[in-house]
Image: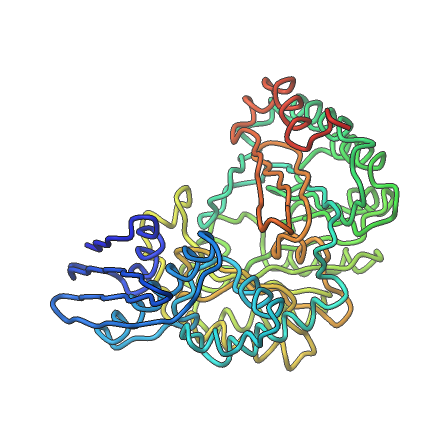
Amino acid sequence: MLKTNALFMEKDLGDIVKLFRYRDEDITHELTYADGVYTNTVCVDGRKSQSVKYCTPQSELEYKRYAKRTAQLAVYRALSDYFGETMPWGALTGIRPTKLAYSELEQGRDFAPLLREMGVCEENIRLLQDVLTAQKGIYSKEGGTDLFVSIPFCPTKCAYCSFITADIAYTKQYLERYTDALVREILFCKGKIKNLKSVYIGGGTPLVMPKHLLERILQAIEEIRTNGCEYTVEAGRPDVFTEEKLDLLARYGVTRICVNPQTFTEQTLRNIGRKHTVEQVYAAFAMAKKYPFSVNCDLIAGLEGESKEEFLFGVREAIRMDPDNITVHTLCLKKGAKMKESCSYLDAGDISEMIEGSRKLLYAAGYVPYYLYRQKYMAGNCENTGWTKPGKACVYNIDIMEETCDNLACGENAVSKRVFANEEKIVRFGTPKDIKMYIERQEELLAKKAEFFGWNEE
């Protein structure tokens, strides 16, 4: 059990402990601070260590930032020494390592020394540098808004999925009413968006929607998207692709779609609860090539029963399909995922070798990493990385991962964000995680959304 006298960072230190498959060891941490000196004393089952760091905070916010950083590193080093293990991202447990890198650059410092101090391996430091290079020309703190539209229906629920999505077989009765509510919310935002940078329809599996309902949603977005900005539809699983629906997307100006097989191995598809075949994956890619869309392909490393060889075969096949983007996710098990019941987030065999192998293959094929993020309970303590052909990066993915723009989110379980870059503050407003409740609370939600974005004051 971890005990610390710095209660405001107890959760952060607990995240460090979880990296090392915490068992029964007694762990204590004590922080003292005086005259710019942070002293962290850590004891693991009687083995004591101490670290001292000299920092001069200029505010209460900086004091807490330095306190957490020095404490996390002290606990990480103590546990690394005790267990004889190191982690690829060292003592970093945050979702977005790029934020730390950008923060250092904005202070006029190279970010590599700090990452090395935090225990990040050299390969990941180089990966971060490549990500920042790929984001040049897109990354900006000058503001703007991205529009997200949530369609929370899927053909079936995948075993690894923890998203708030609904099996369409059990929710068909809500499709018309959900579309009514969603269209109303989208049109409520008309004329209120300044500098629309991108539109992203996600889910769920948007193409599972009946054509006439999908068109109603596209029609509503058409009244907002007036500047020809990037427009992505997460088309989703191959078994929902039809030329009729792709025709519809093309007609309404969609510029990007996602084909999300997650694997190119038949047995793995069965293991995760997918009803489509690998042959349908190939058919979806062939169908998409008839249109001028940029295409993204999603893969997951660490799926149940999939070997390193099978995963890397999938990476090679994805490359052979020649999409503009390939996203490699590391299996992450959260509450709500069926696999969480039987798997430990660290028990994923060759996961690190899978990620390393995918990097080599993608670099060799001419792809470069353009965004990455991490989550808790990720297999192997690895990361999710979006890879792109040069010049084909997705604006929405960069904006949402780096949190540089407001995000106007519509639909069930949609989280809007307002970014106050000068104050280093982000505020959020989320809609209900239940489809029925989202539909029934429309009046209240629209009023709260207007208040959240300050539309009533304009």
Q: Quadrant of the N terminus?
A: bottom left
- Considering only vertical position in the picture, is 273 above or below 388? above
Query: In screen coordinates, is 370 left or right of 292?
Result: left
Quadrant in which residue 78 is drawn: bottom left
Residue lying at the far left in this picture: please name it. 46
Give the image location of residue 5, x and y in percent.
Answer: 24, 53
Give the image location of residue 102, x and y in percent.
Answer: 60, 66
- Considering only vertical position in the picture, is 293 above or below 110? above
- Considering only vertical position in the picture, is 445 above or below 103? above
Query: In screen coordinates, is 126 left or right of 334?
Result: right
Q: Nearer the viewer, residue 266 or 367?
A: 367
Q: Nearer the viewer, residue 406 or 319?
A: 406
Query: In screen coordinates, is 434 left or right of 449?
Result: left
Residue at (54, 47) in percent of width and height = 275
- Considering only vertical position in the picture, is 301 above or below 359? above
Q: Residue 294, can we see it?
A: yes
